[in-house]
Image (spheres, rainbow, N blue to C red):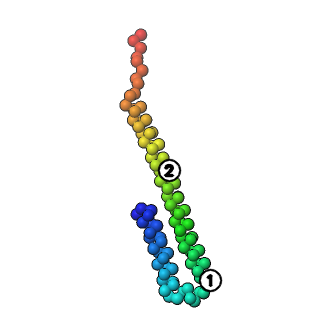
């Protein structure tokens, strides 16, 4: 699942939960205090998604860097093992 699909799922869950609550009369029974609470919940969901997206990007960058380092090390070790210099023996 890519990040954009993950965002759609998260938004869908939040909207579904809020919609269900509203359909059951939650907004009328809670009164005017419910609107800021619902907005805060949605805001926290979006902020959590954004933070998770940043962390995933950092992890991907770190793994990419590590992979590049390992590839360089492997190429270096292969090159050095192919061309082993054997010292000449003295004929004296």
Separation of disc 1 and disc 2 at Cα?
44 Å
Most foreground residue, 39 or 21: 39
Image quadrant where one finds the C terminus: top left
Residue 64 falls left or right of residue 51: left
Q: Regarding mark 1 in the picture, which secondary structure is present there? A: helix
Most foreground residue, 21 or 62: 21
Q: Residue 23: x and y, percent? A: 49, 86
Asked which quadrant contains residue 48, the reply is bottom right
Residue lying at the far right in this picture: please name it.
Answer: 33
Q: Nearer the viewer, mark 1 or mark 2?
A: 1
10 Å crowding of disc 2: few (<14), some (14-19), many (20+): few
Q: Which residue is mark 2?
A: 62
Q: Regarding mark 2 in the picture, which secondary structure is present there? A: helix
The residue that appears at 42% across and 39% down in the rendered structure is 74
Q: Residue 55: x and y, percent? A: 52, 58
10 Å crowding of disc 1: few (<14), some (14-19), many (20+): few
Residue lying at the far left in this picture: please name it.
Answer: 82
Image quadrant where one finds the N terminus: bottom left
Asked which quadrant contains residue 78, the reply is top left
Q: Which residue is mark 1?
A: 33
Q: Residue 42: x and y, percent? A: 54, 73
């Amino acid at each position: 699942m890519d990040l954009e699909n993950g965002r759609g799922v998260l938004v869908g869950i939040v909207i579904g939960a809020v919609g269900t609550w509203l359909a059951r009369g939650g907004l009328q029974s809670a009164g005017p205090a419910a609107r800021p609470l619902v907005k805060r919940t949605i805001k926290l969901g979006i902020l959590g998604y954004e933070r998770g997206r940043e962390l995933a990007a950092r992890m991907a960058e770190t793994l990419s860097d590590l992979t590049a380092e390992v590839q360089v090390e492997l190429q270096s070790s292969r090159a050095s093992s192919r061309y082993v210099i054997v010292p000449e023996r003295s004929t004296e």
